[in-house]
Amino acid sequence: MLPRTIGRAVILLAVEAFFFILFAAFMKTDETGKVIAFLLFFIGLGVMFKKWEKARLTLTGLFKELKIVAGAGFVAMLLTLPFIFQASPYLIHICVMAGLFAILALGLNFQLGSTNVVNFATAASYGIGAYASALLAVHFHISFWLGLLVGGSLASIFGLLLGIPCMKTKDYYLSLVTIAFGLIVYILLNNFSWTGGPNGIPNIPPPSLFGHSFKEPLSLFGYQLPFQSNYYYLIFLLVGGSLFVAHRLHHSRVGLTWNAIREDEIAARCHGIDVTWYKILAFCIDAFFGGVAGTVYSHYIGFISPENFAFIVSVVVVTMVILGGMDNVFGVIIGAILLTILPEKFRAFEDFRVLIYGLIVVTMLMFRPQGLFPQKMRIYKK
Amino acid sequence: MSSLLETNKLTIHFGGLAAVNEVDFTIDQGETVGLIGPNGSGKTTFFNLLTGIYKPTGGEIRYCGKNMVGLPTFKIAKQGVARTFQNNRLFLNLSVLDNVLIGMHPQQDSNWFDAIFRRSYVEREIEQGVEKGLELLSQFSEGLLTNCYQRAGDLPQADRRKVEICRALASNPKLLLLDEPSAGMSPAETEELMEDIRKVRQKVGEIGIIIIEHDMAVIRKVADRVIVLNYGRKIAEGTFHEISDNELVLEAYLGREEKDAQA
């Protein structure tokens, strides 16, 4: 039995490694033609996977059987990424941004995916977290690690403040309130003098850990990694933490209650669910995630201005959740990664970016409303 | 003994229309009351008043001796009033078992903090919920038990009703409101449904059930007492036999014989 398991584990890791190498190669190409070739290849793989049932069942069975091996292999490969991209810090930067958006999308997923509250104010909580920690760091020399908590909590309080007026409205009207809120935050950031107005806040100090400043290159096992790697590992941990929280919330009474509200609000009320409270809870948790992502962003880039937190950011995050798969935490992360990397690869078409986001949303909602990776039923062990 | 639920001149106006007009109603523990009347006579509105979905414009509702008027729906539900809906409002994209688990929401108490940091507590709660849910489903149908991870929206109509009743029972209600449970069912399915209702009464002896029904066969077999509404008013009350001879009731359903018109 044991040799067979080892054999299966090797096959599993080989499959993972294959995809990982493919991904790394994809990241390294920058010619539009090759990028398109890669994309077609990926789509082909996806279609084949869908058509070829035997392969699909074998593979999914393999993953289910050796969950821990699969997870460990995946994590190990992700951890080597900065070594592979050692020569091109730009690629690591893209990965860091993908991670930040993954956190934002995971946060929004509590609302858009689980509860069907279409919130267009993600950029606001993102911005509030970023500004709060940046101001604290610049004026009061508060450390990044404390700022992370403060940024998240402040954003959470703003989420609560946004949630209360939103509860007076429903559906589209609720979305309108969140859009208005996002715009208000944007305009305030632009017009207050203590936020630096349109000039933003420059010179935000980088975080440091045990005397190692995140602005310095990282030396690991005799390799000199570009300074972005510090943030890559930080984001890796934070995405892991967010995933953990999102997964636990999904598989609990709270997640189930959110789903009930999404499906039928009146029936939910008739089963003793305090709809208002649970919706506000979703607002607060979403905003906390946004605030944390914002804090990391501001300290990473070292400079923030209101432009970084404009309405379009919210739209992008909504698109990520819809593309990836509503309420599926892994799907949402894939959506975030796809929609961060692809625009970078298609820099030539940057002017059409918003158009493409719109197209994605419309196509997904028409042909696959459940997203690339739909939510699965909860299965309970007996 | 005070009654389980009592309404006193319960009234709601929608603009100039009195959808429910000064209705006095009582139900005791362990009693099954049928609520009948022609379409549009205010039966479902009456349920919506009891569950707090509509706020009455007059009168009072006393449940276990306490005034319930003005309480939000979810608080009324938490005190043990469960209902099913005329048009079947299951959580369609969730599994059968998840639907029943949501029914247990009022008795469970884990919050977001527990979900993240006190996993063992949450897991025990889920485990107990699943056990109870499966037991409930097994009492209603073996088929539902084996398909408990099926999407509720993929079930046929009769099974959906059953799941809805299971979901309502999952909260251990003291008062169960059934809004046309046999709608859209074949005679055989209706027969099965009546059997189910009888089972519920046997198992939970003290539960009070109010049932809205158009199928008089169901009412005759299940209800201890029948109340007839017409144009929002209570026009008759009594056992099924008393009601079926009542002239006002016949008139409401069949219309008046036009003796005066000929004269």
Image: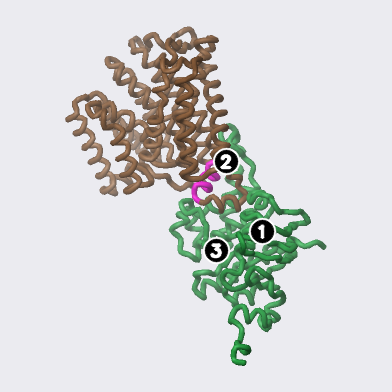
The disc numbered 2 marks a residue on which chain?
A
* Residue A342 on image: x %, y %: 28, 30
Q: What amino acid is found at the position of numbered circle 3 in the picture?
A: Gln
Residue at mark 2 to residue at mark 3: CA–CA distance:
26 Å
Q: Which chain is green?
A: B
- A3, A249: nearer the viewer: A249
- B194, A151: nearer the viewer: A151
Does residue B49 appear in the picture of this structure?
yes
Q: What stretch is highlighted in magenta?
A: A252-263
Say which residue label 2 marks: A278
Say which residue label 3 marks: B86
Kindly identify the residue that appears in the image at 29 percent across and 49 percent down: A53
Kindly identify the residue that appears in the image at 66 percent across and 58 percent down: B50
Q: What amino acid is found at the position of numbered circle 2 in the picture?
A: Tyr
Secondary element at image label 1: helix
Was residue A167 drawn as part of the magenta stretch in this picture?
no
Kindly identify the residue that appears in the image at 46 percent across and 25 percent down: A187
B192 w.r.t. B119: above or below: below
Say which residue label 1 marks: B50
The colouring scheme, among rainbow, by chain, secondary structure or one colour, is by chain
* Residue B174 on image: x %, y %: 70, 58
Q: In which quadrant of the rendered image does the N terminus of chain A lie?
A: top left
Q: Is the magenta stretch mostly helix, strand or loop?
A: helix
Residue at mark 1 to residue at mark 2: CA–CA distance:
24 Å
Q: In this view, does A48 lie to the left or right of A142?
A: left
Was residue A260 drawn as part of the magenta stretch in this picture?
yes
**Furthest-bottom residue in view?**
B263
Do the residues indicated by labels 1 and 2 lie within the same chain of the protein? no
**Furthest-right residue in view?**
B1
* Residue A353 on image: x %, y %: 29, 32
Q: Which mark is residue A78?
A: none
A67 w.r.t. A192: above or below: below
